[in-house]
């Protein structure tokens, strides 16, 4: 059963590595990361924190471009080429095909996050004399959120087209990150109650960029939210 899911996932990874959008985003993000240290200083001793802040925001934006581009086009392209019918005709259940597709995209995003992390750690180490390993915590949070976005896009595009899937994904992200302030009465920094579904649990910019990082229990909360959302 899982052998079929794994085979589909590896096929998705192989196809993603041949797509130009993945490499274009990676190169563009790397160039921007290299340019971050040239930004003006915001005060003595704050340079490294500003770098981490920009690096996390850049990684998040670039990762979203990659995951949405891969997720919203995968199923519609397979249907258009009619290759999905060949796959399903080989005793592959629909859930196995969809889960395998999602797993493949998540594996691609693991590689993307590791690449971004290596670049930002290297630049931070060379520029500020510290590796800033806490950026790995932000990379994990971004990876988990991208996994949720991939699941949402696949769910939408299993019935609708790629354009609809992309618009729906952006709306999903907006609502997911806005619900906390809406429930909190529009107060900036307000936290939604634990029972309100919110993507803000994956927003770790402040503790990672300007603090000492996140705790093990918080990582557990992110993993639990990831599992429930997916």
Image (cartoon, rainbow, N blue to C red):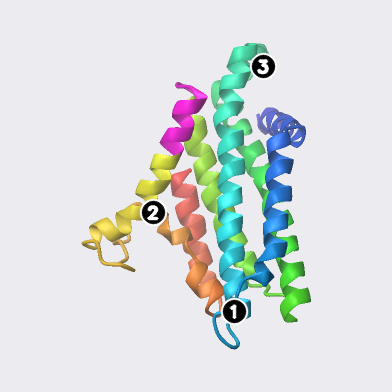
Is tag 2's residue or tag 1's residue first in the polypeptide sequence? Answer: 1
- What's the magenta region? 158-169
In whole angstroms, how far apart are the C-alphas of marks 2 and 3?
Answer: 37 Å
Q: Residue at x 55, y 85 (%)?
A: 43
Q: Residue at x 35, y 47 (%)?
A: 175
- Secondary element under disc 1, as helix, strand or loop, is loop
Label 2 secondary element: helix
Query: For the residues carrying marks 1 and 3, which lies nearer the camera in this image?
Result: 1
- Which mark, residue 177? 2
The answer to whether 71 is drawn above or below residue 195 in the figure is: above
Element on which disc 3 rests: helix
Residue at image position (63%, 68%) is 135
Which of discs 2 and 1 lies nearer the camera? The answer is: 1
Give the tally of numbered discs.
3
Q: Residue 171, image x and y in percent? A: 39, 41
Q: Earlier in the sequence, mark 2 or mark 3?
A: 3
Earlier in the chain: of badge 1 and badge 3, it is: 1
Residue 130 visible, this orientation = no
Residue position for label 1: 41
Residue 87, numbered circle: 3
Question: Measured from the top left, where is residue 146 in percent x and y?
Answer: 55, 47
Front residue of 22 and 105 = 22
Dot 1 surroundings within 10 Å: few (below 14), some, or many (20 or more)?
Answer: few
Mark 1–mark 3 distance (CA, rounded to whole Å): 55 Å
Coordinates of residue 214 in the picture (x, y in percent): 53, 72
Q: Residues within 10 Å of mark 2 (few under 14, many from 20)?
A: some
In screen coordinates, is 180 left or right of 44? left
In the displayed structure, 132 sits above or below 13; it is below
């Amino acid at each position: 059963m899982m052998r079929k899911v794994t085979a589909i996932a590896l096929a998705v990874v192989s196809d993603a590595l041949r797509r130009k959008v993945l490499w274009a985003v990676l190169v563009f993000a790397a160039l921007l990361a290299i340019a971050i240290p040239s930004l003006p200083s915001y005060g003595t001793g704050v340079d490294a924190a500003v770098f981490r802040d920009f690096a996390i925001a850049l990684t998040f934006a670039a990762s979203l471009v990659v995951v949405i581009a891969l997720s919203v086009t995968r199923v519609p392209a397979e249907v258009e080429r009619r290759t999905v019918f060949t796959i399903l005709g080989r005793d592959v259940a629909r859930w196995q095909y969809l889960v395998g597709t999602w797993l493949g995209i998540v594996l691609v995003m693991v590689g993307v996050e590791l690449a971004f992390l290596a670049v930002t750690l290297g630049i931070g180490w060379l520029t500020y004399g510290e590796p800033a390993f806490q950026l790995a915590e932000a990379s994990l949070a971004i990876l988990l959120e991208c996994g949720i976005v991939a699941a949402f896009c696949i769910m939408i595009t299993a019935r609708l087209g790629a354009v609809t899937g992309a618009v729906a994904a952006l709306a999903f992200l907006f609502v997911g990150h806005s619900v906390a302030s809406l429930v909190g009465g529009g107060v900036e920094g307000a936290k939604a109650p634990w029972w309100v579904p919110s993507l803000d649990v994956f927003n770790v910019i402040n503790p990672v960029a300007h603090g000492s990082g996140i705790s093990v229990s918080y990582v557990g909360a992110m993993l639990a939210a990831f599992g429930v959302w997916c």
